[in-house]
Amino acid sequence: MKKLLFLTLLISIPIFAAGASVILTATPTFLLSGTVTLTMISSPTISASAVMAIYNSSTNSTQLLIPSFNGKYILNYDVNGYANYRAQGILRTPNSTILSNIATFTSDIPAASVQSTIVYIPFISNELPSCVVSVKSIGSKTLSFTNFSSPTGLSINPLSGQIPSEESATFSVKPTGIFIPGNNYTLDAVMKTNDPRSGLSNYLLARYILGPDGLVITPISISGTSFGVGSNLSAYFSIYYSNDVALSYIYVVWITPQNSQTSALSPSGNDFSSSVNMTLPGTYTLSKIIVGYVYKNQSLQMIVNPNLSARAVNIIPSMNIRLVNGTRQVVVNVSSVSTPTITVKDVSNSYFIPASKIGQTWVGTYTYNNTPGNVTIMSTFLNTSSVISKSFTKYMVRGGNITLSDGGWVTIPNNAFSVPSIVAVYLESFSPQDFYTGYSNFNQVSDAVSIVSAVTPVASFDYNLYFFNQTVNGLFGDIKIYSLQNGNWQLSTINPNVEVGMQMVNFEAKTGTYALGLTAQAQHNLSPSIISFWSIPSNLVGNGNVYFYLTVNNDCYYKLYVYDMRGRIVGFQSGMAVASNRNLVYTLNPSSISNGLYVAVIGIGNLTNAFTQTQSIPFAISK
Amino acid sequence: MKKITYIFILLMAFSVITFGDVLDELDNPSAYGISMGGALYTVYAGSQSIAYNPAGMANGEGGFFFSHVEHYLGVVRNDFLAGSLNAGNFYFGGSMQTTRTAENYLNYSQYIFSGAVAYRTKSISIGTDINGFFGTDIVNGFSMDLGGIFQTGNYTFAAVLKNALASITWQSTPPTVENYPAEIIVGVGYSNSSFDVNTFVNFTSKEFGAGIELPLTKFFSIVGGYKGSIGAQVSNAFSTGLAIKNYLGFDLFVSYTFIDSASFGQLLNPFTVSMNYNFGG
């Protein structure tokens, strides 16, 4: 240590010898073990007394050498173990000038030992073998690595990470790229490390040599994952094979909800398809593709299991039309799993309406002409016989009453339009419900009426909409006007005038789409109470459903559980209930539960999850 | 023993040929059982074990048991009366259970009559019972339970085949017969001087439960339990209870249960009381 201090003091003296210098180099500077060549050269070539000092960090010692120096001195220094080294060469020139230089090298590095693998696959197929490669961290420092495929096509696991010193790790390598027979492929799985040694930072994990022979079935796809019953599900795939392969047969195996179907395809060409008609609801699976082939006079067979599935459901196609106020446009929405053909008969002329598909919905737009009369929009469907038709009527108004088709009417005042205008009137039918169900916030209790015009009216119309007493169930004060805004129903600020005896609501509004509805409006300052809670029937004998009704004194939220005698929940429903109404809060279908005694428990409150009152009723099922 | 094994395997196989949901019965009628989360299958609980695991009936000299349960805000009430008698290694027992509705809204009652026999050695006990069903809407019905308890060290293991061969003829037009799958129940218990833990899983009905009993004095214990089920809707019930055991030959159990307390502000199953008298004190 004293020697090192002495040397450090020596070199700390700033000495400048004009034109004389010494260079000390170490080769290599990073190594695990072996020999480092230390070369000390003076410039110009001079004879001098020299000292070479080598400091070893692991032993904390310095080795001093006093070589004879005639312009150049080479020392081969053996390195063992993990350490950092610092070498210093010092020359004293004849005129007592001291020259010095330093070189460092180290064996304290990360390094790897890799058992590389070469995998030779002369015949390419869908299933190519993987291999496992073992790597040991043989350096003194933790080995960091990132793996990659060169070129792409190999999957390596893990992709990146670290291996502590003296520990081992295994890597799996699998070909996952698309390899077309007839070609040769060479792919390397490479591990890039933090090994600082020159040319040793990248290690070869595995080399795959593929081809040129082979047979590959790829890509494999199906035409969709969700269909309506009656649709066709198709599978598409290609078979690539080398010249020395001849296809013998191709079978496609489908698994349907009922059975397994196998269809044979002609073994010619590269691209193939197979279809199955989805006659039943359920899951359809492309289970297997079986290819028979001859290779090197051997008859062989390849089986691929794509297991691609699609579901077929019973979907009844539906069509809605929406008249756009301020224009003469009508927007047609068709929900169907099969492709619709949309046509329109505008008074006496017929047209085709092009539609674009968005999800399972086809959307088309039609601009009706200026002639009064009926417009009928019709949708037919590929592979099905169903036809959906919706109509609206165009009126030429100069003031006066327009009589609607269900007996309702609207009066358009004389000053509403400055010039005679076309007004389109569309009524949406509805299914009367016995009771307000409470399952949704808005319960429509009348037809929805659309009265639109390309010309903005300057005066309001006088609307009359009709309801059934049964649907309102005495809640005449709760009837509200709802208007359709951008496809969504919104509570209107229009004040309705309810004519109870005539089962009619009168209100003033301009053009638009309106309907009557009921909404439960739970208010935080009102605490609801259960007036009655009961089931019909209380003892179900034979088939049927059990209906649960709730009457409350204020609009509220409810949550209902049905328990069996073991405390298991066999039914659940939450929603809103309207005050004073007989709210149908739940319908229990007992087909999947056992006969016996059950209890329905209902909780109500003015918040969705805070119930202030709970009541229970027993009921029995004997199917 | 081989014959019993064959019968057990046969009934297990029969349970695979299921017919839908399990029998809808009140299968946890004791305050002790309720406070233990239903995990009474590994416990030698005397005659009340007829409702859980008939092998557990083999305890002491036998005795009488009575329990009253009011479920779901009191609209369903259950009374359970059971008795057992020791004869050497054998125990014989019987029970009657009534389940009825408490309000005028529905006039309903159901009765289960059971006869049980158990055989116990030092570390193992096996038992069986047969059950007859009658009631307002039940013409007649039958089921059979088989169970065993095995004890080693501080551990107790139980296996029960419940409601094997269960079939009920229901009062419909015409009467309909409904068959039910046998339920496979497994229980594990651990006991030492400081606490007693018992668990069970019913693989058929997807119910499970666990309970712990902490003796505070020679006679007095506190009990806590959890019972849950996994299905279309998960239900859960936390229970607490008190147990006074073997005081002048009497046991008294009181339980307090919170069923789905996160959903409802009120307690659905607030209070249950059971009493047991052990012959021989």
Image (spheres, coloured by chain):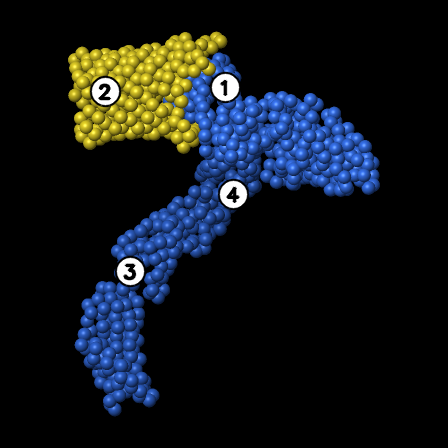
Chain colours: A blue, B yellow
Horizontal side of A211 relative to B165 (left or right) equals right
Q: Between disc 1 and disc 4, whose residue precedes?
A: 4
Circle 4 Cα neighbour tier, 10 Å, few/some/many (<14 / 14–19 / ≥20): few
Q: Residue furthest bottom?
A: A95
Q: Between disc 3 and disc 1, whose residue precedes?
A: 3
Chain on which label 2 sits: B
- CA gap between label 1 and label 4 equals 57 Å
Which residue type does callout 4 highlight?
A: Pro
Asked which quadrant contains residue A315, the reply is top right
Frontmost of labels 3 and 1 is 1
Frontmost of labels 1 and 4 is 1
Chain on which label 1 sits: A
Horizontal side of A18 relative to A209 (left or right) equals left
Which residue type does callout 2 highlight?
A: Asp
Which residue type does callout 3 highlight?
A: Lys
Frontmost of labels 2 and 3 is 2
Contact between marks 3 and 4 (CB within 8 A): the answer is: no
How many numbered discs sit on the rendered protein? Answer: 4
